[in-house]
Amino acid sequence: MVYAGKPEVAARIPGIATNEAAARGFVERLVLQTVFGIVERQARSALLPNSIISAILGQLTVKVIYAPMLCQDVLLGLADMTELEKKETRCIIVDNTVTAICINPMDAKAKCDTMKNVMAVNATHSTISGSIMTTNIIMAKWSRAMWQGVVNRAVRALAAGPFGSHFFAATATVGGN
């Protein structure tokens, strides 16, 4: 998820976040809802009553760490390779996804049409990490395999969603206090 640096960018790209907090919040909610949904389904399959499921979910904390990318301006696909102002960076968007960035480090205008100024999105902006913590004594004693199962199901659920190509791998590290 990215966010717009200018109102004109937000006007050109429907659904783009208008600030960093909104972009981060969107990703956090998406991951949180997915993890909670998986734990809830697992509890329902164990035939737990709603009151217990509610208590379990209330004892679950999901922390998401993500650094959204600022798009000061955008290029809509490869056909939109217009001149860049001096020292300007633009996000290249293809099919509603930022696929690369174009950087003009020069003190003069330059075209974004050569491979030397088209770069991949930095891993900082394409990596989502987080942690799942619980104060529920039963869940706290789950094995590494059980937690890895939750993480694997979360990745599959996110991959099946509207931003599926952006969620493709995850790992679980089980630790204790």
Image: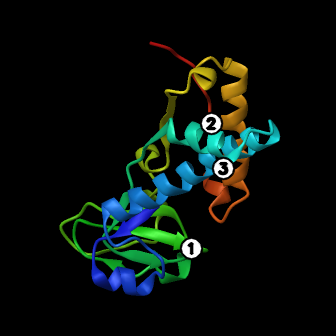
Q: Secondary structure at mark 3?
A: helix
Q: CA distance from mark 1 to mark 2?
A: 24 Å
84 or 21: nearer the eye?
21
Badge number at residue 32? none
Task: Indicate which label's residue lies in the foreground, 2 or 3.
Answer: 3
Q: Which mark is residue 37?
A: 3
Q: From the viewer's perspective, tell me whether residue 52 is left or right of residue 61.
A: right
* Quadrant of residue 79 within the rendered picture: bottom right
Estimate the x, y position of residue 59 in percent, counting from the top left: 50, 35
* Residue 12 coordinates in the image, percent (x, y): 43, 86
x, y percent for residue 92: 47, 69
Where is residue 100 shown, x and y percent of the image? 49, 61
The residue at the point 66 percent across, 56 percent down is 165
Give, as a three-letter code, the residue at label 2.
Ala
Can residue 120 be seen by looking at this rendering? no
Mark sitting earlier along the chain (2/3): 3
Secondary structure of the residue carrying numbered label 2: loop
Observer-side mark, 3 or 1, equals 3
In the picture, the quarter occupied by the C terminus is: top left
Residue 170 numbered tag: 2
Q: Which residue is mark 1?
A: 96
